[in-house]
Image (cartoon, rainbow, N blue to C red):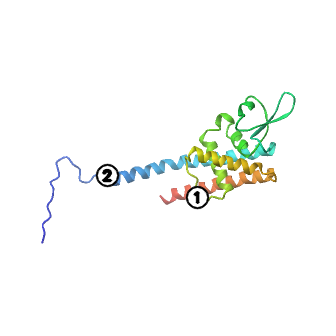
Amino acid sequence: MSVLATTPVPSGVDRTAPSLSRRIAERRRLAREDRIPAQLAELSAARALFADAVRVVEAGWIQDGWFAYRDEQDHERLVGPHNLHEITGRQLTGACLVGAIVHAGGGLPAARTHPVHRALDLTWQALFRVAQPVGYCPAPALRTARVRDLTRWNDRPSRTPGEVTALLGAADEMAAGQVDQVRHLVEAV
């Protein structure tokens, strides 16, 4: 028979306080709960952005450039990632898939914002039928590669505006599915 030695507990220490691991687990749980409304708002914003992007494509879809505008001689000019400054202050006459998303998200000033990035990620995910949610902060090189994939897909000679709007619709459905997943997580808690 062994005798267990006990360490005396100093006075003032609350023996009923949760352990450090329980406090950490609780903080993580609360942080997850705090992220849920933000995720739902973000996905709702993406869905509205997709609807606007469809309208942009329907108004004038282009290939081999991100945006199109008419110059002073009434010639249509294409603008890509390397000469975007040319569209400053001009009325757009067309946009490709990526351009439509950027334009729907607020135009060039909003191109590097999280809502536009998220919409591009969801569109890429829909194009390649990636089932799991896309990471929230992919590396810049990965995001650039995804934009390149979307641009190449848009510029394929046989592509049609209907296929572009269908992809935007698939991205919207993907966002809706992720809304449902987040809501199920809430119900499970």
Residues 163 and 175: in front is: 163
> On the image, which quarter does residue 84 sit in?
top right
Q: Residue at x 28, y 52 (%)?
A: 17
Q: Secondary structure at mark 1?
A: loop
Q: Residue at x 39, y 52 (%)?
A: 26
Q: Which mark is residue 132?
A: 1
Callout 2: few (<14), some (14-19), or many (20+) C-alpha neighbours within 10 Å?
A: few
Q: Secondary structure at mark 2?
A: helix
Quadrant placement of the N terminus: bottom left
32 shown above or below 103: below
Question: Where in the figure is residue 66, as x and y percent of width and height?
Answer: 74, 41
Mark 2 sits on what residue? 20
> On the image, which quarter does residue 64 sit in?
top right
Question: Where in the figure is residue 108, as x and y percent of width and height?
Answer: 68, 35
67 shown above or below 145: above
Question: Where in the figure is residue 131, as x and y percent of width and height?
Answer: 61, 60
Side of 42 where 62 appears, left or right: right
**For the residue marked with disc 2, what is the amino acid?**
Leu
**For the residue marked with disc 1, what is the amino acid?**
Gln
Camera-nearest label, 1 or 2: 1
Callout 1: few (<14), some (14-19), or many (20+) C-alpha neighbours within 10 Å?
A: few
Residues 140 and 112: in front is: 140
Separation of marks 1 and 2 at Cα, in angstroms: 33 Å
